[in-house]
Each structure stands twice: as structure tokens, then as C-alpha cells.
Image: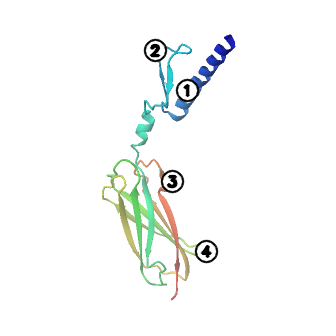
Amino acid sequence: MAKKKIDSSVFEIVVVLAIVFIVAFTGQVLIRYEGKSLRVGSGAITGNVVAESTEEASAKDFLDVSIKKIEVNPPSPLVGEPFEIRIIVANEGFVAINEPFYVKTEITPNGEDVKPTVVNSVVTNSLKPGEESAVSFKIALVSKEGPVKIIATADSTVKLDDKNSANNQRSKTIIINSQ
């Protein structure tokens, strides 16, 4: 009988330590211990979520601007002909972006020692969470036939307090044709 009582106590201690580890690791209270005291054998463990950590709640208050996509019209421009580059930016965070920010576009033709053409545009309209906006550039690129790399960067001056800068840049390669 004494061995069963010890095994039960060890099991409860392991469960309590596992709970402490889960709370420390995730920052969430995932289970609740019901009982008036922490005596061995009292109370019951339930699976209800009883609290959300303040860390998780504040994680929903972050700002995240991103480059959603790069569109080129026509998709394969001709040598010497102007074309349009349209950059779609999005607010993927949980708070509105009310400050103006810059979108930088670098256009680099294929070749050795070729410096990119850099064009900047400002997004002045407010973006609510989930909203998108577009900036457009009309480009008259003097280049030979071949690939051209386009790199767009949102918030290029790092003015916003963006919590996820990994999605602030996107690139696309287009082909300039002679005919």
C-alpha cells in the first residue's frame, strides 16, 4: 500500500513539473488545478484554458508591412519600350499604419558592373490591418535583351516599428525582349 501511495505522489509531482514547464515555455496557462490546497491527492486537473499571457496579448498589437507582389505590364517588355512596375504593399499586422513610409524599387539589368536604377515612392494613405495599397512606376529602361531583376523594399528607411521585417522585400526577374 505504501508503494502505491509513493507512486501516486511521484506521478502528481511529475504532472505538476510538466505544467510548470509548459507555462514557462509557452507563456500560457494551459490547465487549471482545482483544489483548496496542494496536498497530494486533493483536487483535480482539468483541460480548460484559464488565462492568456500578457506576452501573447501584446503580440496581437504589432505592425507588419509587407511587399505582397510585384506586377509588370507588359510582362515581357520590349527593348526601349516603357513598361509599368506596380508594387502591392499590405498591412499584415494587427494595428493600422498611419505614418507615411517609402517603397524603394531597384531595377538591375543583367551585366557586369551594372548599377541598379533606384526609384522611390511614398505610401501616404493609412493602411488598416489586412488592407493593401499599390505604388506604380513607369520605366523607360535603356537596356539590351535579357533578364532584369526588380527588388522592392517596403519601409526602406526603417521608419515604422515593423515587428516582421522578413517580408519587407520581394524580388522578380523579367525578360526584356527585342521583338
Cβ–Cβ below 8 Å for labels 3 and 2? no
Amino acid type of disc 3? Answer: Ala
Disc 2: which residue: 36
Cβ–Cβ below 8 Å for labels 1 and 2? no
Cβ–Cβ below 8 Å for labels 3 and 4? no
Circle count: 4
Disc 1: which residue: 20
Which of discs 1 and 3 lies nearer the camera? The answer is 1
User: Helix, strand, or loop for circle 4?
Assistant: loop
Local crowd size for mark 2, using a 10 Å CA cut-off: few (<14), some (14–19), many (≥20): few
Q: Quadrant of residue 18?
A: top right
Which of discs 1 and 4 lies nearer the camera? The answer is 1
Above-or-below relation of 142 to 165: below
Tell me which residue sits at (47%, 50%) in the image.
164
Disc 4: which residue: 112
Give residue 88's mark.
none
User: Helix, strand, or loop for circle 1?
Assistant: helix
Local crowd size for mark 4, using a 10 Å CA cut-off: few (<14), some (14–19), many (≥20): few
Amino acid type of disc 2? Answer: Lys
Above-or-below relation of 79 to 171: below
* Distance in Å between CA atoms under marks 2 and 4: 76 Å
